[in-house]
Amino acid sequence: MDTYLGIDVGSISTNLAVINEERKVLVWEYLLTGGKPIEAVQKGLKEIENKLPSGTEIKGVSSTGSARHLTGILVGADTVKSEIIAHAVAASHLIPEVKTIFEIGGQDSKIIIVRDGVVVDFAMNTICAAGTGSFLDHQAQRLGVPIEEFGDLALQAKAPTRIAGRCTVFAESDMIHKQQTGHVTENIVAGLCQALVRNYLNNVGKGKEILPPTVFQGGVAANKGMKTAFEEELGYEVIVPEYYHVMGAIGAAMLAQETIVETKKTKFKGFEVSEVDYKTRSFECTGCPNLCEVIEVLMNGEVISRWGDRCGKWEVLEK
Amino acid sequence: MAIRVGIPRALLYYRFYPLWKTFFTELGAEVIVSEPTTQEIFRKGLKKFIGDTCLPMKLVFGHVITLADKVDYLFIPRLVSIEKDTYLCPHFAGLPDVLRAIMPDLPPILDTYFNVRKKGVTMRSIYEAGKRFDKNPRRIYLAYQKAQEVYKKFLERIRDGITPQEAIQAFDGEEVPPVKERKERLNIALVGNPYTVYDPFSSLNIIQKLRKLEARIYTSEMIPDETIEEGIRALSKRIYWTFGKETVGAAFHYLDSKEIDGLIYIISFECGPDSLLKEIVDDKARKNKKVAYMSLVIDEHTGETGIDTRLDAFVEMIKRRRRSKKMEGEKNGK
Ligand code: SF4
Ligand code: SF4
């Protein structure tokens, strides 16, 4: 069987997915990056290899996410694309008429506007945590509610408490105040979901043409309270796809397939790369006052890639 | 020994450096420019600055500090207006005073007053700027004439399609690859305050990054003033900031021109004028379904990864749009 592998390495999680020629998801893997992208990728590859039925051949591979370049070098990616494109490709395949994609992860969030299957606009939150999953994690902790139960609890709310959601600090003090004045937990929890939704729509979604069908994906889409809060705010149903948490990897796998149509032959180094000894190290270049921190990747002790230099003088590896 | 004049590599250096340098050199002075911005220069400026301001103003402080013990004079003109009927943002007019108040030990500042709003550049301003080097008004005037000639050539080079950054390099005698020989597949217009867009530190090297992604860069300096005016004619109110007018005029022109695939507006996070103008540009760009648009708000905390991800996605978005349009065309053609 011919298959394609996509790897999405972000700051929080590392996701891998394998699809077949018909773009059906065969296996997937979700792990925490834990600040060690190389280890996460190697571990993920091992898991995927174990799960795949024997006789499957990887015909193409692609990487995405903030560590996409590093990952691309490690595994021999056929194409390396930003996660915005990967997310959009996956969502538009599953819901071909999709017009809007909400992607909310642990530490960042995006909105992607799609028309006729192509991305026409996007935005990412950058400065503020208030529009991301960490906002909910933080407040759940304060409330003593496990984050897994958060969504179900929110659905039980009769009258969600209005909570100021401008920023994490304000939300927290407002929430404590509401707790003290006797609001019940489920109402507060639902209120927090609404606050995050308002925040997301006002910051990340500002000025964007948000139309149905809307797909909601990323780790936070697991939270049913969030889905409901979006639906109440927008007045229509939002779709949470089955593989909402690994859409980046699925999209990357599709990009790999697309690339192979043209290049024919994959550069994939094989699952053996999970055994190879990779290391990264860095040094400060003193070639000029920029003092760039140059990062090197070593494979079995040999430098295979460098980046971080502003002038490009370290990029070329002398043989 | 020649008198040494220091020009900070900041603010209007990115617009007038060839003019200023030629003027002072013609009068026998030696011009010294601060090094390109680095983290260290930025930190030096930040330490001295009291209160809150935009990144470009913090940077000029750092550059002035690094120049201080290398020069006899600092050239920090008091700029109110550099062209008819528009003004620079108020930060510019007060800059020499602020610098002197915060750092009393600086070398003397040549703070020539420029307010050309009504009458253009006056002989008086030119004489003021040059009198420390030569008392003879005629020679000062000749130096200015020469400077203007050189400056005109500099502007012409930019109109030919190289960026102001490259035109400055060319003026300093460096090689700049001719536009024709470049491998460029996409056309992207870049607008914003010149000192943010062309300072590689502030803009996180955005021009180089776009080049790597095979984009040809278009800027506001590449189009004539009349075209900029034309661009903003439809607005109900005049924009009275110089760079604001350029930004919006160029953005409007490029959006309507069919020359470009994408437009990127670079904004300094704390910039007052930009925060207002962004709404105007956003609005117009949103209505244009043919040109991809994005604004990047940048300050000293902006992470490189976030910018890379967005640039990658922006360029990829354009390529995919083109491809789907081509496919549609083929379908319809058959
Ligand atoms: S890598 Fe290049 S830009 Fe960075 S410090 Fe070294 S010489 Fe300077
Ligand atoms: S126009 Fe904006 S960026 Fe420029 S000096 Fe004024 S506030 Fe700063």
Image (cartoon, coloured by chain):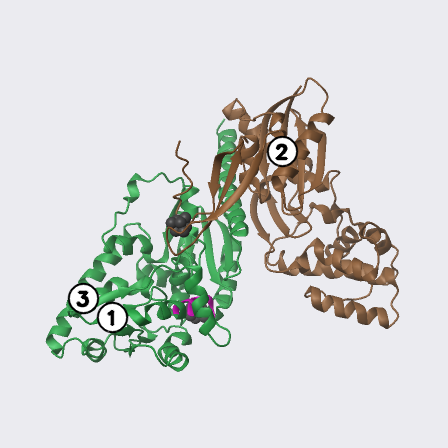
Chain colours: A brown, B green
Residue B258 versus residue B113 in the image, above or below: above
Closer to the camera, B43 or B334? B43
Q: Quadrant of the N terminus of chain B?
A: bottom left
Both marks 3 and 2 on one chain: no
Pinpoint residue A301: horizontal percent, then vertical percent.
52, 33
Both marks 1 and 3 on one chain: yes
Q: Residues within 10 Å of mark 2 (few under 14, many from 20)?
A: many
Q: Which residue is mark 2?
A: A6
Q: Residues within 10 Å of mark 1 (few under 14, many from 20)?
A: many
Residue A262 badge: none
Measure the C-alpha gap from mark 1 to mark 2.
Answer: 57 Å
Q: Amino acid at mark 3?
A: Thr
Closer to the camera, A300 or A17? A300
> Does the beta carbon of the residue at mark 3 sit less than 8 Å from ligand 2?
no
Q: Which residue is mark 1?
A: B5
Q: Which residue is mark 3?
A: B25
Q: Amino acid at mark 1?
A: Val
Pinpoint residue B207: horizontal percent, then vertical percent.
40, 50
Magenta region's main secondary structure? Answer: helix
Chain bearing tag 2 is A
In contact (CB < 8 Å): disc 3 and disc 2: no
Q: Nearer the viewer, mark 3 or mark 2?
A: 3
**Does residue B235 appear in this view?**
no
Identify the element where label 3 is drawn: helix
Residue B41 versus residue A112 in the image, above or below: below
In contact (CB < 8 Å): disc 1 and disc 3: no
Judge left or right: residue A61 versus residue B106. right
Q: Which residues are magenta?
A: B54-60
Q: Residue at x 25, y 50 (%)?
A: B174
Chain bearing tag 1 is B
